[in-house]
Image (spheres, grey):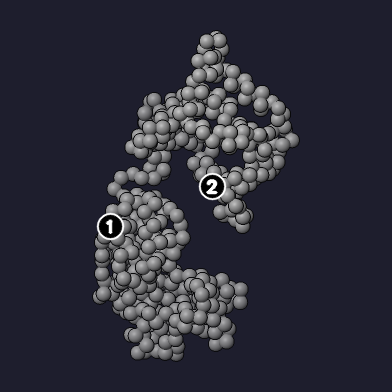
Amino acid sequence: MIHILGLGPGDPGLITRRAWEMMTQADALWVRTRQHPAVPALARHTQVHSYDAFYEEYEDFDAVYVAIAEDVVARAQRQGEVLYATPGDPAVAERTPQLIRQRAAAAGIPVILHAGVSFLEPTLAALAFDPIQGMQVLDAQQVAARHHPPGPLSQGLLVPQLYSRLLAGDVKLTLMNAYPDDHPVTLISGAGSEALRLRTMPLYELDRHDDWDDMTTLWVPPLPQPATYADLQEIIARLRAPDGCPWDRKQTHHSLRPYLLEEAYEVLAALDAEDPDALKEELGDLLIQVALHVQIATEEGEFKLKDVIAHVVTKLIRRHPHVFGDTQVADAEDVARNWERIKAQERVANGQEAQGKTLLDGVPTALPALALAQTYVARLARIGYPLPEKEAVAGLTEEALGKALLHLVEQAQAAGLDAEAALRQAAARLRDTLL
């Protein structure tokens, strides 16, 4: 039998009565670490053993936790009963209880996990925040390993076990990918003890401190304004609801086509103007069109937002094995060639090769002729389409190219020809040579 108990968040008075009685009446107690304020009080009543030495013996926390779990189960096999205690509540933000349960189940050893008081209760009390308002909890190492913080920014975020300045720096960089640099955040240390301390600072100052330990938690309050795609989708769904906006309610995939095209061109105009403020606004307008199409598809039972996101995430990971896998690439050209190989494999898997599909399939034929032709040439160049030698076009600039194209348009006008139609026909002939 293995009993897993909680040491509470700090003050021995916050250990549950059941846990206190079991631990103080036991012949021996094993704790994950002695670095906890309640351990000295328990040590006056029973013999306390710790696994602190494992932190020096193994290279990372995962290995430490596995070793602890294996030792606890082995002791139960030899002794018949073991009491093992973790900081806080063993069911909250603790890895070893999960590992012990898995290994004990395989060995046929019963495990009882006794609920306790976690770091959450005193931390939330210190912050005067009720989690019913919406909150997520993520381990500091999980946040540090990401490049963008997960979850809605309209909810609070607790990041426990922020034990070092180095880790805090990595967490800060992840958070700054979404939150303003000066977003106020709070460090909580000593929650559940007389040493409680709260320090509020702008996010960019997070790692400019030296006082860290395993019981340090970061609080990131929600942003005061809507800031996630979920917020946008809620607004669009509200507009499309029976009591919503008559204009939005009557839209269909087809009726929105001109607006989608218009917004895309306005994004291009903002890019050409190199105007970040305009780009921010126009990208938002384009995103409205995406959200409208997703909401219409949801209502029609075609697909949902999760399907769109899952498809594109899966595709990006599959097409970047040099980032998410073991594939080695030398340069951007190597990436492009590998990309085309992967797409060819996808066409085979989808049965498109047998239907006469080519490298140019998937290029929207509704593109303007110039964009269509350049996309065709760019794709074909990846598999050997002959382009002029770089030396031959070394002096070509966008200005010179624009003048040359304008001159061709002038010639077309003088000859009574449609320049758009001529280039579109030439692109079609290029495509036909592949069929």
Residue drawn at 41 percent across, 43 percent down: 229
Find disc 2 in the rendering and name its residue. 313
Task: Looking at the picture, tell me which residue is in the foreground, 355 or 367.
Answer: 367
The quadrant where residue 198 appears: bottom left
Task: Mark yes or no: residue 134 visible.
Answer: no
Task: Looking at the picture, tell me which residue is in the foreground, 63 or 25.
Answer: 63
Residue type at mark 1 is: Pro
The quadrant where residue 86 appears: bottom left
Inter-mark Cα distance, 2 to 1: 32 Å
Looking at the picture, does residue 77 appear above or below residue 184?
Answer: below
Looking at the picture, does residue 96 appear above or below residue 146?
Answer: below
Find disc 1 in the rendering and name its residue. 202
Residue type at mark 2 is: Val
Q: Position of residue 283 (x, y in %)?
A: 40, 36
Q: Residue furthest right?
A: 354
Q: Position of residue 413 (x, y in %)?
A: 52, 12
Under tag 1, what secondary structure?
Answer: strand
Under tag 2, what secondary structure?
Answer: helix
Q: Position of residue 334 (x, y in %)?
A: 61, 47
Q: Nearer the viewer, mark 2 or mark 1?
A: 1
Give the mark nearer the N terminus: 2 vs 1: 1
Quadrant (top left/top right/bottom left/bottom right) for the C terminus: top right
Q: Position of residue 416 (x, y in %)?
A: 55, 9
Task: Looking at the picture, tell me which residue is in the foreground, 78 or 382.
Answer: 382
In the image: residue 112, left or right of residue 164: right
Residue drawn at 40 percent across, 56 percent down: 174
In the image: residue 111, left or right of residue 380: left
**How many numbered badges does the structure rendering display?**
2
Task: Mark yes or no: residue 154 visible.
Answer: yes
